[in-house]
Amino acid sequence: MRKETILWADDEIDILKPHIYFLEQKGYEVTTVTNGQDAIEMSNNKEFDLIILDENMPGLNGIETLSIIKEQRPDIPVVMITKSEEENIMEQAIGRKISDYLIKPVNPNQILLTIKKNLNRREIIQEKATHAYQQEFTRLSMQIGDARDYEDWAEVYKRLVYWELELQQSSSELLPMLEMQKREANAAFAKFVKKNYEKWVTTDAHPLMSNEIFKTKLFPLLDEGEKIFFVLIDNFRLDQWRTIKPLLNDYFYAEEDVYYSILPTATQYARNAIFSGLMPDKIAKMFPDLWVDEDEDEGKNLNESPLIQTQIDRYRKKYSFSYTKINDSAYAEKVIQKIINLKNNQLNVCVINFIDMLSHARTESKMIRELASTGAAYRSLTESWFKHSPTLELLKKMADMGYKIVLTTDHGTIYVDNPIKVVGDKNTNTNLRYKVGKMLGYNPKEVYEIKSPEKFGLPTLNLSSTYIFASDNDFFAYPNNYNYYVGYYKDTFQHGGISMEEMIIPLVTLTKK
């Protein structure tokens, strides 16, 4: 096994021989020099895993030496040891990307701890996370088995997301076990939804759902005099929110909650329900000119602004509002430049479509599919987009104008890999996680079927309209050209059906720090 190598530069290195001997006994190979110039030359001629620099050396001091080493070898972690606790010295060291610093006098255990923290951090994190999840596995399994209501299931999903991100960070070998546990949870969750969804739609015994977001979350804040930016990121899962949250921590306080998307978990239904405050069947009946049926060629989300207006009018509110849809970074930049024009509105609604576009692009593009081949990679792409797009700057501008931000989505998405055969006519919709039609052929045991759509808040195209929903990791495939169809859509991210990822989605309030 290769020994980890350390370069230690200190003009009083002889005094540190007991420290060096201690590290050598712990299995490290330690090379010593007495000045900054020798440290630079040595680091260029030999590979080291870590460098320790004394801040106060004759000739090149520690800060100067650090600067040169970081220019030449930016990947090597450097630990600074100093006698001084002066703030400017620490700021200089941190500004030059120091990995850690210690204040003299130091003892051998301090040095050892710092080395382990910087060299063995990943292994330590992995070991701790693996051990913690092994202990958590049984408790989580019991929590899944004991889940009885929508609050229980929300907690189950939050815990699964937490462990998914923890194990991903540590590259744990237990990730496949977690994935298996998540699939088991989704299977149980689907049974729960099938048993309870009609009750959710027809009674008051239900979780917060899409059609209640404005009434429950926005109107109370607006009535209290708050100015609100309502930001809806299409197709935005809880794990994706948790991934970008650290990027907001320096600027915002975040109050995280979740709500349940209605079925189908598709933009046409869920987002229109949010903006109208109505279930889809009510939209179709009350505002037929604003609802577009499945069999029509017209875009399904072209009437979002007038739907918002209908909800404001129905609740007899007098809020001034705006509606903006952002499809690309260029338009986001234009919105940032002109955002001051929105300052007089009590409510500004902003829809951001990038993640939904990414999801569809992943299906269509082999290259994007390679880039986002796993859930972890999909989250990474989301993080990269958020970090480098104007979205973060846009949120900051909103807060700087004195607005509270309510950040949410209309539905999530799930990785699918199990095809289920379904037969439909030419008027059957194309979504892979739900179908609606009058002549559907399927195995009832493999789907959640709704034969009386009006009882579930869904529009009826004709007297024999039936809705069917996929659950778990299933997707619908037609028998015609079956192999091609399955090969094209297998291992993609889809939405419209029943899963925790699609239905239990983030609802976050951001307040400027």
Image (cartoon, grey):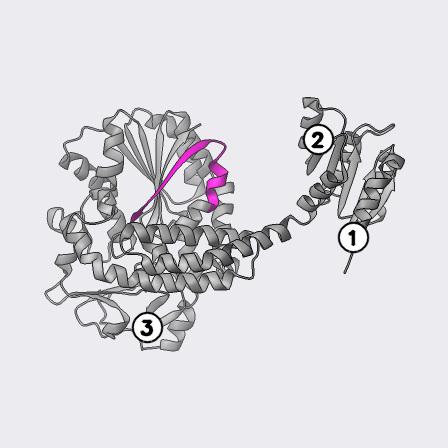
Residue of label 1:
27
Along the line of sight, the residue nearer the viewer: 86 or 25 = 25
Relative placement, left or right, of 346 versus 159 is: left
Of labels 1 and 2, earlier in sequence is: 1
Q: Are marks 3 and 2 in contact (CB under 8 Å)?
A: no
Dot 3 amino acid type = Ile
Q: Magenta residues?
A: 243-260
Front of the two marks 1 and 2: 1
Mark sitting on residue 93: 2
Front of the two marks 1 and 3: 1
Q: Are marks 1 and 2 in contact (CB under 8 Å)?
A: no
Q: Please say if 179 is above or below 248.
A: below
Q: Secondary structure at mark 2?
A: helix
Of labels 3 and 2, earlier in sequence is: 2
Residue of label 3:
420
Can residue 371 be found in the magenta stretch?
A: no
Relative placement, left or right, of 137 versus 494 is: right
Q: CA distance from mark 3 to mark 2?
A: 59 Å
Residue 166 visible in the shown view = yes
